[in-house]
Image: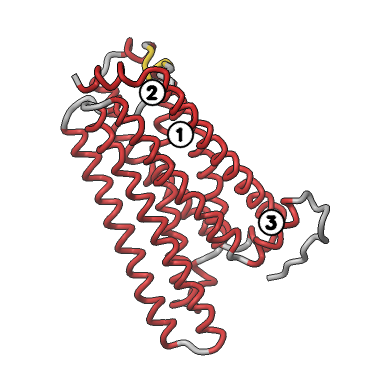
Amino acid sequence: MAYNNSTQSGGLGSLKQISHKVIIVQVLIAIFLYLNCLLLTTFFKKDVFRSSMRYIFFACTLMSDCLYLMVTDVLLLLSFYRIVMQIWLCLLFLIIGTAYNFVFPLTLTLMTLERYVAICMPMQHGALCTPRNALHYILIVNAISLLPISISLSIYWASVPFSRYTENSVCTVEMLIIHRWQSHYWSAITQLYFVIMFVIVMFCYVHILKAARKASGETKKSSGKGLRTVLLHGFQLILCLTRLWCPLVEAAVMQMDLRLFVDLRYANYVMFTLAPRCLSSLVYGLRDHKLFVNLKYYAVFGLACQPPVLTD
């Protein structure tokens, strides 16, 4: 009954409110995509960035951010306006969206580990943190990210007849939940990922903190900067991992009140999807001097200043 009442009471006012929210999201996404594209342009045009594992990981997060934001934005618009699509196409969107929901926090964890090796194991950093190894680590992250959605799709394919894939439906991640126990599966897998990544980040933070206390001079300055970077990654990670739990809460709310479900999904999208990805650009794009000077140059299309010259 709550579902019907909330639908009837919304009316045109509710649609107006949603349209305003959609416009705000589109503006925010456009800003983030523009900034990410500037940073990616900087990365691909400068050899000094392509030869560093730290910047390779950063570029990976930017590319995954762009793809994830575009896919989830399409799904958000379709969900808000109740636009249907064929289920096979919806599954493709869900594969990309769900997998890259994991890619971002896992890559952040990799970036934290890279800072740990650079500060606490400087002698091994050159051997462990090569561009070739970075590509191997990124492939591993993508494989790990695809694992949860692959299991869910296998269950879906085994439970649903083939004729179902050509039917039309509003595309939401909840459609993958065929059996009630699947909600417990998603809860378990997200908590497992959360615990592993949280333990790794805390381990790196504690050891970098010890190194910062023991260091002096330039080494202390580098350790302090690495410590602040790990803290920012930790904050981003908390936001991202909170996002992994959002579908479980949204599914429960959807059964009670549709309007509350739409508002909750919007709030979760802004706070736990857009916000941590915005921080990525800020953590490196504005705090990193090498990236920042290039960002200024490309932001004004090279008209206001001389091209920066960077060395290793």
In this orientation, which residue lies closer to the viewer: 47 or 271? 271
Q: Is residue 27 left or right of residue 274?
A: right
> Which amino acid, mark 2?
Cys
Neighbor class of circle 3 (other Cα within 10 Å; few <14, some 14-19, many 20+) is many
Query: If you read the primary sequence from the N terminus, does the residue marked by circle 1 or circle 2 appear first?
Result: 1
3 or 1: tag closer to the N-terminus:
1
Mark 2 or 3, nearer chain start? 2
* Label ID, residue 72: 1
Decide if residue 32 is on the left or right side of residue 183: right
Q: Are marks 3 and 1 in contact (CB under 8 Å)?
A: no
Circle on res. 171: 2
Mark linked to residue 295:
3
Q: Position of residue 30 (x, y in %)?
A: 59, 39
* Image height of 161 relative to 289, above or below: above
Q: Say the numbered circle drawn on residue 267.
A: none
Amino acid type, residue under disc 1 in the picture:
Thr
- Residue 276 location in percent, x, y? 45, 51
Q: Residues within 10 Å of mark 1 (few under 14, many from 20)?
A: some
